[in-house]
Image: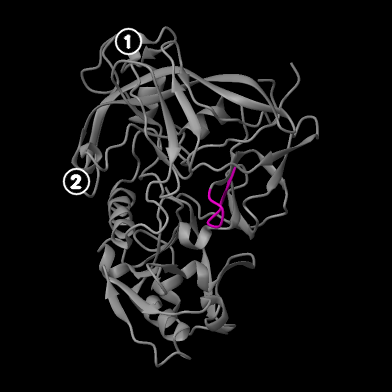
Amino acid sequence: MAPRAAALLAALALLLLVAACSAGPGVFQVRRRFPAGGGAAALRAHDGRRHGRLLAAADLPLGGLGLPTDTGYLDLTLYDPKASSSGSPVSCDQGFCEATYKGKLLGCSPNVPCEYSVVYGDGSSTTGFFVTDALQFDQVSGNGQTQPGNASVTFGCGAQQGGDLGSSNQALDGILGFGQANSSMLSQLAAAGKVKKIFAHCLDTINGGGIFAIGNVVQPNVKTTPLVADMPHYNVNLESIDVGGTTLQLPAHVFETGKKKGTIIDSGTTLTYLPELVFQEVMFAVFKKHQDIKFHNVQDFMCFQSSGSVDDGFPTITFHFEDDLALHVYPHEYFFPNGNDIYCVGFQNGALQSKDGKDIVLMGDLVLSNKLVVYDLENQVIGWTDYNCSSSIKIKDDKTGATYTVNSHNISSGWRFHWHKSLVLLLVTVVCSYLIC
């Protein structure tokens, strides 16, 4: 069979492959986590829970941390490992378990399950055991054409969830892994030779939905910046910030990278969080020409009234990264509407959100929207470009040299996924970059 190129079209920014386990097959849809125009407090609360997980856990089993973003939410039917003819539990003496825990567990003997138990910084928890099963996906075999593909993937089967993960309005039945750890779904597919370790997303805030793709993006061209080595998240080196073309005079230490400091690109976070000094300087520069604006508090957000387009009256904020990569954030991206002619600031003071995150620049969906963002883990770089996320991109098959078009999808409605008794079925498409699938 000839190699086939494809794109992974799935809920955005899900960082860990874990399924909650129970009996019975079912159907679920990807929909908006928070509806457009929803309560601002829900966005802040979501990020608070996200940051508790992001900042407290260093190396979770299955390689990633966090909750879904507000654009993608899986309303799942639970996976039943006993009903799967292709699934099998992972024992504690198997290589996956030993690699995950960096050695054999105490008291391990044959046929004893490889278990996991994780408690996050916000007090939520998940406990269960590892299972290996077949992941079936739709592969793009040409422009707009698909055919079935499959791969064996090991994932956590969550038997018990606690805290927010077990509450009625925050409970999750599955989190899909695109972290850097070897146990994430992306890493497992790459290790099996099914894909290259490159993926991209484009979040469309205008029409909804967007693009999520695994593979070597060749169109549009995307400029990149290096990822910081030996960091668990997508850390990058921020060098300067300018507002309306004027560079802010900030002390060098705010751009340093290390434990509990530096800059993280995180599509699992909705808003953007800045160290207190940076936040104050940015806000002063943004509102410098609007001394007459009267601010009022809306659910702890700094808000104001404006009847015109915010793009006409406020400056562009530009973040400059290593290797001359710029991230332009426009007023309609750092402000968000919150009622009739009311706009609120989407940048937040990190010191008020999390003690551990007070010195971190955490850049979330608000500033990543309407941009194609490419995570090239093969070359340890990340990059982006302003883009129409309702259009399409081109991905290259590295073996044949052929390129394939990947179109946008509206992930906020109509996507259907199925758990079958015989396999884990996930409607995704992946790039067979250099091996036959």
* Direction from residue 418 to residue 23 in the image, left or right: left
**Farthest-out residue, front:** 340
The correct choice, above or below, for 75 with respect to 285 in the image is above
* Direction from residue 433 to residue 262 in the image, left or right: left
Residue highlighted by disc 1: 82
Q: Is disc 2 in contact with disc 1, using a CB cutoff of under 8 Å?
A: no
- Please name the residue shown 53% across and 75% down the image: 240
Residue highlighted by disc 2: 123
Q: What element carries label 1?
A: helix
Residue 125 drawn at (x, y percent): 22, 38
Do we see residue 154 in this rendering? Answer: yes
- Please name the residue shown 72% across and 54% down the image: 221
Q: How far apart are marks 2 and 1 (CA)?
A: 30 Å
Residue 354 drawn at (x, y percent): 27, 62
Give the residue type that dot 1 points to: Lys
For residue 200: magenta? yes
Q: Residues within 10 Å of mark 1 (few under 14, many from 20)?
A: some
The correct choice, above or below, for 320 with respect to 378 in the image is below
Residue 419 drawn at (x, y percent): 42, 20
- Which residue range is magenta in the image? 199-208
Give the residue type that dot 2 points to: Gly
Name the one closer to the observer, 289 or 372: 289
Q: Earlier in the sequence, mark 2 or mark 1?
A: 1
For residue 78, which quarter of the picture? top left
Name the one closer to the observer, 241 or 200: 200
Residue 38 drawn at (x, y percent): 36, 57
Residue 345 has which mark? none
The correct choice, above or below, for 125 with respect to 20 in the image is below
- Please name the residue shown 46% across and 45% down the image: 13
Name the one closer to the observer, 354 or 232: 354
